[in-house]
Amino acid sequence: MTVDIAAAAHAETMRLDIHEVVRRLNSHVGATMVAALSGSRDSKLPYKWAKSTVPNAEAQERLRFAHRIWKIVADAESDHVARTWFRGTNPVLGEISPVIAIREGRFAEVAGAADSFVSGNWSA
């Protein structure tokens, strides 16, 4: 993945209101997965975040990061492939899903896994 692609995804994500970030993630991966990656156990909370409630700072960080990675994978492949990539186990992440790794705050590893997937270079 080029720096330009990562920078563009970052810039787009940072310009979005957190409610819009959550709406997009809810639409792409579903509220249950959004709750899981944010660290919440309440699968209805992402619907509230999409409208008016503001997630705490840690959840916002995870949500913005997830959106950025979603954008990179979906733009390189498709929405369906990105959804499958987020849910599936990943060899670069020690056979856990990117959703769980994001919840655990393993941002650099997830970014590396996304880069490996998009570029086809599995040496990450």
Image (cartoon, grey):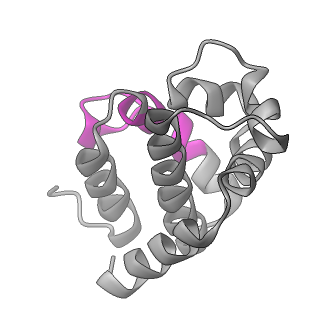
Residue 85, magenta (yes or no): yes
Front residue of 8/74: it is 8
- On screen, residue 24 versus residue 37, left or right, reads right
In x, y percent, where is residue 120?
Answer: 32, 67
Which quarter shows the C terminus?
Answer: bottom left
Task: Give the answer, above or below, for where 76 lies relative to 45.
Answer: below
Which quarter shows the N terminus?
Answer: bottom left
In x, y percent, where is residue 49?
Answer: 74, 37
The furthest residue to the top: 41
- On screen, residue 53 versus residue 112, left or right, reads right
Front residue of 95/22: it is 22
- Counting every numbered tag in the picture gives 0
Residue 35, magenta (yes or no): no
Quarter of the image for residue 123 reads bottom left
In x, y percent, where is residue 61?
Answer: 45, 45
Q: Residue at x 31, y 46 (%)?
A: 107
Task: Give the answer, above or below, for where 24 lies relative to 105.
Answer: below
Quarter of the image for residue 90 reads top left
Q: Residue at x 31, y 52 (%)?
A: 113
The furthest residue to the bottom: 4
Q: Residue at x 69, y 42 (%)?
A: 29
- On screen, residue 107 versus residue 87, left or right, reads left
In x, y percent, where is residue 44?
Answer: 79, 21
Front residue of 23/119: it is 23
Front residue of 2/103: it is 103
Q: Residue at x 24, y 46 (%)?
A: 109
Prevailing secondary structure of the magenta residues = helix
Residue range (magenta) = 84-102
Quarter of the image for residue 42 reads top right
